[in-house]
Amino acid sequence: MSPERVVVTGGAGFLGSHVCDALLREGAEVVCVDSLRTGSRDNVPARVEVVVADVSQPLDLPGPVDLILHLACPASPVDYLSMPIDTLKTGGFGTYHVLDLARRKRARVVIASTSEVYGDPEEHPQRESYWGHVNPIGPRSVYDEAKRFGEAMTVAFRAEHGVDAAIVRIFNTYGPRMRAHDGRMIPTFLRQALAGEPLTVHGDGLQTRSLCYVDDLVRGLLAMARSDHPGPINLGNPDEVTVLDVAHRSIEVTGSASPIRHVESMVDDPRRRRPDIGLAQEVLGWRPRVPLEEGLRSFAREFAG
């Protein structure tokens, strides 16, 4: 049963807009709150109310709110490296203001955290009980530490104010509406392959990722919203692949003749990334369904069209 009125922060972004789509299909009234710095109105379905606002500032919305999905935050390297202070403010002040809105509206709130809280992990696969291995002053820290702080704020609001707040840790997700130049691996590879350019693989390419198609991830988010579990719960695809393998598959699905070019490794780039999704399976009855090959082909068609 869908809640009556749902607020999606970051609803004009890649993931948030797909969440808005899914909520509309379930019959919910949806409000998108977005600063539009990295999102686009073009992503937002017509029946969604759009409130242009920066969640790092105090947030108030008229009327009842049953559920909040807090997805607002620059998530691509291009964005968070160019807007480091905004990223920290969104993850810190923004999460505070969203949790305070949930307190005032007596709404359930799901806070989107990230696999980046695990950093370059020393435990593999990563379980929710793992504390992480993060460089707090490295270039990626503005995103990693903003999310870690947001988790701490969520737990504090739950303990002090009794807010019905939950945390999901989202692993690498891909699919339609990712921007071609946002710096993340799959849109970068597809853009380069379709243009006949070399695919730029950082380092030796043997670092691993676990890639979840956006439709699967949205199912997991909504399952968490319907549950009463506080989290944190990992949401991601446990099928682990190397970056080099993703590059070769991107060439294959696009029919490209592009070569692969190795470039300098990224600072603090995790060597291995794979979620343990046992808790998501047990509590939410969720696991991803879309194989990487199928998801890449679907995304490549949208990208080319």
Image: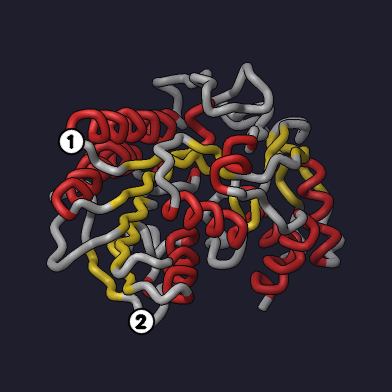
* Residue that extends furthest to the bottom in the rendered view of this protein: 46
- Using residue 166 as the reference point, say whether residue 285 is left or right of it: right
Q: Residue at x 67, y 34 (%)?
A: 274
Q: Which residue is mark 2?
A: 47
Disc 2 and disc 1: Cα gap in Å?
33 Å
> The residue tagged with tag 1: helix, strand or loop?
helix
Mark linked to residue 161: 1
Q: Amino acid at mark 2?
A: Arg
- Which residue appears at 23% of the width and 66% of the height? 52
The answer to whether 51 is drawn above or below residue 103 in the figure is: below
- The answer to which of 213 and 280 lies nearer the viewer is 280
In the rendered image, residue 283, in percent from the top left (x then y), is placed at: 55, 42
Report which quarter residue 172 is drawn in.
Answer: top right
- Residue 101, given in percent of the width and then of the height, sits at 18, 51
Q: Nearer the viewer, residue 294 or 185?
A: 294
Please say if 35 is above or below 20: above
Q: Can residue 220 be seen by looking at this rendering?
A: yes
